[in-house]
Image: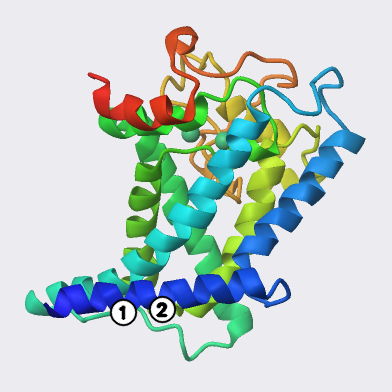
Amino acid sequence: MAFFDHVVNIYTGYAKYLWGTISDPFRYDNYFYYLIYVSLAVWILELMLPWRKNQSKFRKDFWLDAFWMFFNFFIFNLIIYIALSSVTEEYFGKMMQAIGLPKKGLIDLSGLSLWIQFPIYFILADFVQWSVHVMLHRVPWLWKFHKVHHSVREMGFAAHLRYHFMETFVYKIALYIFMAWVLNFKLEYAFFMHAFTILVGHLNHANVGWDYGPLKYILNNPKMHIWHHAKHMPSTHPYGINFGITLSIWDYLFKTDHIPHSGRDIELGFEGIESYPEGFFELQIKPFKDKE
Ligand SMILES: [Zn+2]
Ligand SMILES: [Zn+2]
């Protein structure tokens, strides 16, 4: 019963939070409007400075991906994020306690100034997500779900948030356990980190030919991420290349970086994409039906 009450409380709190964000566009931690503003800004950038000049303004699957974006980000991501994180906080902590480990905060950074805490959180969170992304490519049953993201045939900013909802579970569980249990991270900080991740992620998928000059060794970028979506992988890296989320440093460090030439016009997808479904509902159920 306690578990049930806890979940009900979280969702009641979440419903209030949701209404608060929709009714107040100027709230500082307003994910909903932030997503709309950033999407419009990056789309305008694509229209003004297109990398593939003959790509349609409303590229293939533009509307489908716009729908994915809200489905994942607004409905699913936040609900799971908030509910899962509070539930995990409560029950994962208790589980750990039961086996004699601390309830949370294995490493305590709270004594440090926020200017030091923040970059540490950010860099470690990015590394956790990079590692999860590598697993999504290497573990066959995870790859079935991640293929949905790789089913983008023509690249544009909204492709960023086309991913199967199972990915949210995998990423958030890994991230939450690490950030909250290991680092005792305060959830209120998450907005700022997430906001930056969304901006860079939108740009990574945008139809703009940018790599930020020397900053490309630190920040993931469109010219690097398009190769992550290449249909054909190099024989040296059959599982994939350029796994970076926000930072590109992990790929350079672990030698998974690969940019052989301009990826502007390369073919995207994976082997067998020709017979992969394209509709929203088919994409949601496809990974559950797929055999190895
Ligand atoms: Zn991937
Ligand atoms: Zn991508």
Question: For numbered disc 2, what is the local secondary structure?
Answer: helix
Q: Is residue 36 left or right of residue 88?
A: right
Q: Position of residue 210 (x, y in %)?
A: 80, 37
Label 1, ligand 2: CB separation under 8 Å: no
Q: Position of residue 53 (x, y in %)?
A: 87, 21
Q: Give me the residue at 67% from left, 27% from top.
A: 155
The one nearer the camera, 10 or 109, is: 10
Q: Give me the residue at 69% from left, 39% from top.
A: 157
Q: Amino acid at mark 1?
A: Asn
Where does the C terminus fall, quadrant-wise? Answer: top left
Q: Are marks 2 and 1 in contact (CB under 8 Å)?
A: yes
Q: Quadrant of residue 134?
A: top left
The one nearer the camera, 124 or 129, is: 129
Q: Give me the residue at 45% from left, 80% from top.
A: 186
Q: Is residue 21 left or right of residue 147?
A: right
The answer to whether 123 is drawn above or below residue 112 in the figure is: above
Q: Amino acid at mark 2?
A: Gly
Q: Position of residue 274 (x, y in %)?
A: 49, 8
Question: For numbered disc 1, what is the local secondary structure?
Answer: helix
Residue receiving disc 1: 9
Residue receiving disc 2: 13
Q: Residues within 10 Å of mark 2 (few under 14, many from 20)?
A: few
Q: How many numbered marks, from 0 up?
A: 2
Q: Position of residue 87 (x, y in %)?
A: 27, 71
Residue 244 visible in the shown view = no
Q: Give me the residue at 82% from left, 36% from top.
A: 46
Q: Residues within 10 Å of mark 1 (few under 14, many from 20)?
A: few
